[in-house]
Image (cartoon, rainbow, N blue to C red):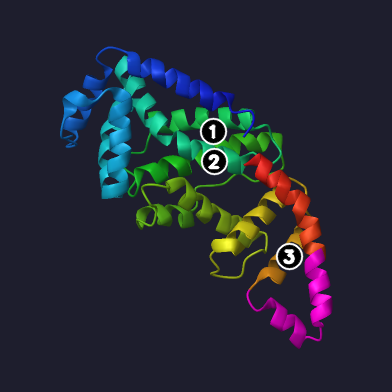
Amino acid sequence: MTGTRVFESLDAEWALVCAGAGRAEMVLGWLREGGVVLEDERAHGLAELLVELECRDRVRGRVHSDRWMRALLERAAGDGDEGQLAARVVVQAMLPGAVRLTQRLRAGRDFDETGQVVVSCLYQVVRRYPMWRKGGVAATLLLETLHMASRELRADTEAEAVPWHPVLESAVVSGDVAADDPAGVVWRTVLGRQAAEAGLLQAEEVPDGARGELVELLVWAVAAGLLDVVRARVIADESRAGARESAEAAGVSAVTWRQRRSRTVRQLRPIADQWVQAA
């Protein structure tokens, strides 16, 4: 990945934050007040504390991540050094998701410039997190960041911002968002909506597996101006299960079908190369 200065700078800054005296103890105190107790608190610096919290999230799931994140987000809304520290810990925890959102949103833009917008929006969302909102905290942070960042990036392109949509909110409230990869689930939800609006998915179709990757490539290619939406719909139709059988039933020979597929592969190969580089 090229042009990742914004995230490299944040990691370097995090090392300085962790080196600050008394900061780990302060965060541990907030966690205790929020009902999060670690087995051996004396063994933790701030960096080790965050790593352990994330490891526990993978074992205990969303209930655990919600509890400790809410404890810090309540502090992050305040002024002064304490509010800044609480916000910084949450932002660090959300950086992997921010990187993934940057990868998805860049579509023809500079990665680092897109990342700066995403991180700026993430900070704003953390500082004014809607504590009243139900559902997974990490997923809500990402959805709010996605909504805000896509709106700001829209000024540079013709792309439509991603609104806070009831379909997206339902994915958070229902508990379908995994604690270890909320960004992936959030994006699949957004991708399904974008693909359906572009006519690349049938009603109730879920973009997963190999077909999901193809649909994501098509959505990205259309947004980046590398593929006409009409052609993208044709390719999406051709990739559906049973498409070959339907074509043969309509009188298209197996040879013609193979030739059509070969042309599609040739057309998509350079686009896929750019997509991989963008990721």
**Mark 2 belongs to which amino acid?**
Leu
For disc 1, the neighbor class at 10 Å (few under 14, some 14 to 19, many from 20) is: many
Q: Position of residue 159 (x, y in %)?
A: 68, 44
Q: Which residue is the site of mark 1?
A: 118
Residue 194 included in the magenta stretch of the image: no
x then y, percent, for residue 104: 59, 44
Residue closest to the eye, 191 or 212? 212
Q: Of 141 and 207, which appears nearest the observer? A: 207
Amino acid beneath label 1: Val
Query: Circle 2 — which element?
Result: helix
> Which label lies toward us, 1 or 3?
3
Q: Is residue 18 above or below residue 278?
A: above
Give me the C-alpha separation between circle 1 and circle 2.
7 Å
In the image, 217: left or right of 261?
A: left
Identify the residue position indicated by label 2 in the image.
Answer: 101
Numbered disc 1: secondary structure:
helix
Mark 3 burial class by Cα count in 10 Å: few <14, some 14-19, many 20+: many
Q: Pinpoint residue 253: horizontal percent, then vertical percent.
A: 82, 83
Do residues under tags 1 and 2 come within 8 Å of each other at their CB atoms? yes
| Quadrant housing residue 216 | bottom right
Residue matched to label 3: 235
The region drawn magenta spans: 241-262
Label 2, residues with CA under 10 Å away: few <14, some 14-19, many ≥20: many
**Distance between the alpha carbons at the discs numbered 2 and 3:** 25 Å
Q: Where's residue 91, x and y in %?
A: 41, 30
Q: Is residue 193 visible?
A: yes
Does label 1 or label 2 sit earlier along the sequence? 2
